[in-house]
Image: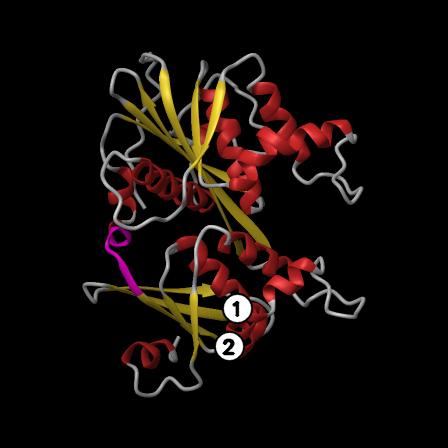
């Protein structure tokens, strides 16, 4: 995927006034790949867009990394807009009790992602940084509103995730050796100056509303066909897990991450179709243990990732047993 990379010209804008951040993470085989996206609006009417990779990070870690990177890149006082309730509450409310309790949660366990959170708290110290929650993946937004800019940040985060696969050791932007912690080197960032529509050039099809999605999971891979409202399709085949069940979970996580929204997804796994509306909430309430058992729910880490993705969107699942009689399913059966 080609993308124009503009060198880090030291064009100093007026103060940043709004910064939109987003993170994305997906499991590929045995490891996770993440990305972060940042869209910054300046007081002189210009903007800057940043996409960067996060190696082996969860979705929450990618969201926090986006905020951390924004604070590193843009000095001053402004509002950060994020669709991550977890990140906003962690940085504005929860950290107070965590600090008092020696960075342990109400159950006495070590707080997850505490190093990232501590770094962000240090970066925003003595600065007037506000946080505002934006609902993710909204339809019918107007150009220029918060949902519009959040959508671009989401596309940038997806782009950042793709940078894990590309050789970007040359090009990109050097930011003078700013420490990024667990983030890849800033030289692996894509930064675009100006107001061109990056998201439309990266994922033009995704700006058309999705009608429905078909997923076919096999033992070690899965296929996806996204049917848009204009009946055009986006098709892909991805590697899976060790068995049909794990591959089905990876497929659902992939769909929720890459194609967010509220629509119907058809999949050939009856357990997954039953689990999300009927069992998921109880598993979560029971700390991902089976009812009346000392056994963890199988692939509970995948279920945790799916549950986090479902916090900001909905999905309607339909089970199908046979591919026959549907042109999309018949095509998927031959992956």
Q: Residue furthest left?
A: 230
Query: Looking at the image, which residue is at 72% across and 32% down?
Result: 98
Image point (29%, 39%), residue name: 148
For label 1, count other residues whose C-alpha is less than 10 Å away and answer few (under 14), some (14-19) or many (20+): few
Q: Left or right: 3 with respect to 288?
A: left
**Residue 83 location, x and y as percent?**
45, 41
**Range covered by the magenta-colored residues:** 205-211
Task: Select label 2 or label 1 by which is in front.
Answer: 1
List x then y, in percent, for residue 76. Answer: 45, 13
Which disc is residue 269 wearing? Answer: 2
Name the residue located 65 percent from the left edge and 26 percent from the top edge. 118
Alpha carbon distance from label 2 to label 1: 14 Å
Crowd tier of the residue under label 2, counting other residues whose Cα lies within 10 Å: few below 14, some 14–19, many 20 or above:
many
Give whichever of 132, 16 is nearer the camera: 132
Q: Earlier in the sequence, mark 2 or mark 1?
A: 2
Q: Is residue 115 left or right of residue 319?
A: right
What is the quadrant of the C terminus in the image? bottom left
Please tell me whether mark 2 sits on a helix, a strand or a loop: loop
Q: Which residue is mark 1?
A: 277
**Secondary structure of residue under mark 1:** helix
Q: Is residue 247 visible?
A: no
Up-down: is 1 above or below 190? Answer: below
The quadrant where residue 238 appears:
bottom left
- Residue 310 falls inside the magenta stretch: no
Percent position of residue 329, x then y:
34, 78
On the question of residue 49 being in view, the answer is yes
Q: Give me the residue at 45% from left, 69% from top.
A: 222
Q: Is residue 305 left or right of residue 324?
A: right
Residue 5 lies, with reference to residue 179, above or below; the image says: below
* 208 sits to left or right of 313: left
Q: Do callouts 2 and 1 mark residues in contact (Cβ within 8 Å)?
A: no
Q: How many marks?
A: 2
């Amino acid at each position: 995927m080609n993308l124009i990379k503009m060198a880090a010209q030291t064009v100093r804008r007026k103060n940043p006034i709004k910064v939109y951040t987003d993170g994305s993470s997906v499991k590929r085989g045995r490891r996770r790949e993440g990305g972060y996206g940042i869209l910054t609006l300046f007081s002189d009417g210009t903007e800057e867009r940043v996409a960067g990779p996060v190696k082996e990070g969860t979705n929450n870690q990618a969201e926090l990394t986006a905020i951390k990177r924004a604070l590193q890149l843009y000095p001053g006082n402004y509002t950060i807009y994020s669709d991550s309730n977890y990140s906003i509450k962690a940085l504005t409310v929860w950290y107070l009790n965590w600090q008092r309790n020696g960075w342990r949660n109400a159950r006495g366990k070590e707080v997850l992602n505490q190093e990232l959170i501590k770094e962000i708290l240090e970066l925003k110290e003595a600065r007037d940084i506000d946080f505002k929650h934006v609902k993710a993946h909204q339809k019918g937004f107007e150009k220029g509103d918060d949902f519009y800019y959040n959508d671009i940040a989401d596309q940038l985060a997806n782009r950042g995730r793709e940078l894990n696969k590309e050789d970007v050791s040359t090009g990109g932007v050097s930011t003078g050796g700013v420490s990024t912690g667990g983030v890849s080197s800033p030289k692996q960032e894509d930064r675009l100056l100006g107001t061109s529509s990056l998201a439309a050039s990266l994922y033009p099809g995704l700006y058309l509303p999705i009608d429905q999605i078909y997923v076919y999971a096999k033992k070690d891979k899965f296929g996806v066909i996204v049917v848009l409202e204009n009946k055009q399709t986006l098709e892909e085949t991805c590697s899976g897990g060790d068995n049909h069940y794990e591959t089905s979970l990876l497929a659902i996580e992939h769909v929720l991450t890459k194609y967010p929204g509220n629509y119907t997804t058809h999949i050939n796994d009856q357990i997954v179709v039953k689990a999300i509306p009927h069992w998921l909430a109880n598993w979560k309430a029971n700390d991902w243990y089976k009812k009346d058992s000392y056994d963890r729910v199988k692939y509970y880490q995948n279920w945790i990732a799916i549950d986090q993705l479902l916090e900001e969107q909905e999905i309607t699942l339909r089970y199908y047993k046979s591919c026959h009689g549907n042109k999309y399913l018949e095509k998927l059966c031959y992956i």
